[in-house]
Amino acid sequence: MSIQLKNIKKSFVNNKAKNTVLNKISLDINDNELVAIMGRSGAGKSTLLNIIGCLDNSDEGEYLLDGKNINEMSNSELSTIRNEKFGFIMQDFALIEDETVKHNIMLPTYFSKNKKKYDCEKIAKTLGIKKLLDTKASLLSGGEKQRTAIARALINDPKYIIADEPTGALDSKNAELIMDTIIELNKLGKTIIIVTHDENVAKKCQRIIYISDGNLKAE
Amino acid sequence: MKGILICTADLIKKHFKHSIVLIIQIAVTVMIFVGFIGKVQYIRSTKDVANTFNKDNVIYYYPFTFLDSEFKTEDVIKQNNLNVKSVGEADYMMINCDDQLLPIVGYNDTLLEYANLEIASGKWFNDSVDKNVIPLISTTDQYKLNDHITIKDRAGESHDAVVIGTIDKDGYVLGFNRSASKSIISAEFFVSKPYSYFIAPYNSEIYSSLSEQYDMFVEMGMPKMTLGKIITYDSKEDAEAIEKEFDKYGSVADIKLMITNYKKDIKFNILINGIILAVFAILTATGIGGINGLQSRLDRRNYIVYYILGMNQKQCALTELLRSLFVVALGFITAVILYTFESVRNFLYSSEMIISPLNFILALVFLLLICCFVSMKYVIDLGKGSLIERYKNQD
Ligand SMILES: Nc1ncnc2c1ncn2[C@@H]1O[C@H](COP(=O)(O)OP(=O)(O)OP(=O)(O)O)[C@@H](O)[C@H]1O
Ligand SMILES: [Mg+2]
């Protein structure tokens, strides 16, 4: 088992009121799974994803990633894990808008400690954005931006892909294209966790997990 | 580290236009700061020289330059039966040193006694000097301590001279080349850069003959250099009589009064310069602070992305620090480049400022302090708390 969450608890304090978003959640995700996380807005989907992606800490509970205890890791170890093990795809693309597509795709390699060979051109070609490599990110369409973000998520060849509503800002045609790409990646061996509101997107996944009132319900 | 540098470069590129105003502001602050330090250093070294003159019962007298050469201080004293203790005089001469004509300033005994200047090496004139050689104080780099010089007088006869002491090349000597009144006092009266090669005692037979060579120069059309004198006295009544009489032939003022005015002048000068400096420091601090604050806010999204992709928060903070330091460095370099232009130097700085690399180093330290003070907040903010949380809060 590659991702193991045990009794994870996370709350936020808003105007002195404590809001428990995740209440002792336990979840296991296997290698090469494609998991959809669903729930109404504010249910805690992004919060869970941020904890899995080592972007945020939990308040309580245990998180083992490939057998290693994430709770015991330093900030710099966590940043290395984010850089090497995870590829992130966000609803708002999280691109550096005033840099070129190529610069955006290459960013994770600049933070990487191992000297792997990166094939930016090949990845861009597969995603159909090779011609756009020298274009400023701000000039791209939504679909192109998300494909750039996917290329960036793949550049360090991570084991896991974390996608927080990757199709949320796209029209249905582009959404389908992106979803097909994500499924393709899963077939190539990536473990993918995807947050979505879209039933059609969720149906394409092997497993769907619902969050409500701080608890998980599997289907 | 590579990632940090690339991101820093990206952010600098992104804000370059915004930064130009700040860079100019920083450059101006550096220029002003350098001048201020220059002034303070000047005052520090001139105060010592002026203090050697802080004596009781001395009058400074500077003759009108148009008085004819027949005019003699002694005659005025004799004719008016003035009660004068002694007269201190300096004379400006050209002498033949090692077959080269060089300017020399001669001090008479009274002046030698009063003007005890700070010596960089060797010693000031005193009786123990060998009477057969002419003692000289060197005021340039060209002649070093214990150098022997052959002086030729007008008759062609040679005399031995030796350098018994040196004055630091950045040092100051008593000026005697400005008139002074009771109210208008300039620091330049007391001090000036050495305008001769040597200071020598003006009591030797040899000099009087050598001095004629200078008269020869005057005949050849060179401007005559008028030097001030000091007159010492015993009682207040004598002083009043002396001042009243010499007022007809030049400007007179009591040294004590001049020193007092001079010190007030110094304080005023430092105050004015300090206020200007403080205003610019505040402008620069708010400039750096404001623009950094704005940029930090604009850059927040970039930092979130960097964080997601594998930077930790300390590295984000370091990137932010490098970005602000880069702007400061550019401002500083701009100032240094501007300084290399003579017109800029002439416009901003006077001869009453000592400017050396030290001034620039202090200016840099000053800037870094301001920068640390105002941008630390943003840097520390980036380094702690959760970037992800703040990202969400801002939406
Ligand atoms: N940094 C924070 N500070 C305070 N409250 C927060 C913070 N982050 C999230 N929350 C709260 O936690 C709850 C869950 O937020 P989360 O973003 O995980 O929801 P979500 O399921 O992703 O919703 P959506 O579908 O709208 O994206 C919300 O009520 C939100 O207001
Ligand atoms: Mg969300």
Image: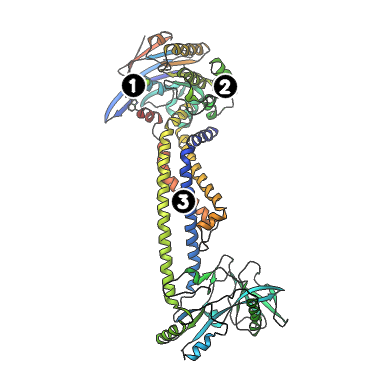
Percent position of residue B231, x then y = 49, 82
Q: Secondary structure at mark 3?
A: helix
Report the residue marked by disc 2.
A120
- Judging depth in this view, the residue of A75 and B336 nearest the camera is B336
Residue at the spot x=55%, y=71% of the render? B173
Q: Are marks 3 and 2 on the same chain?
A: no
Q: Secondary structure at mark 2?
A: helix
Percent position of residue B341, x then y = 57, 53
Please give the chain letter of the residue carrying mark 3: B
Percent position of residue B65, x then y = 53, 77
Name above or below for residue A112 compared with residue B30: above
Which mark lies nearer to you, 1 or 3? Answer: 3
Judge whether residue A66 can be spotted in this image. Answer: no
Relative side of A21 to B296, left or right? left
Q: Quadrant of the C terminus of chain A?
A: top left
Rendered image coloring scheme: rainbow
Report the residue marked by disc 3.
B29
- The quarter of the displayed image where residue B112 is located: bottom right
Which mark lies nearer to you, 3 or 2? Answer: 3
Which mark lies nearer to you, 1 or 2? Answer: 2
Residue at the spot x=54%, y=84% of the render? B71
Crowding near the residue tagged with mark 3, few <14, some 14–19, many ≥20 C-alpha atoms within 10 Å: many
Percent position of residue A159, x then y = 51, 19
- Judging depth in this view, the residue of A203 and B251 nearest the camera is B251
Q: Amino acid at mark 3?
A: Thr
Q: Secondary structure at mark 1?
A: strand
Identify the disc placed on residue B172: none
- Judging depth in this view, the residue of B199 and A219 nearest the camera is B199
Report the residue marked by disc 1.
A22
Please give the chain letter of the residue carrying mark 2: A
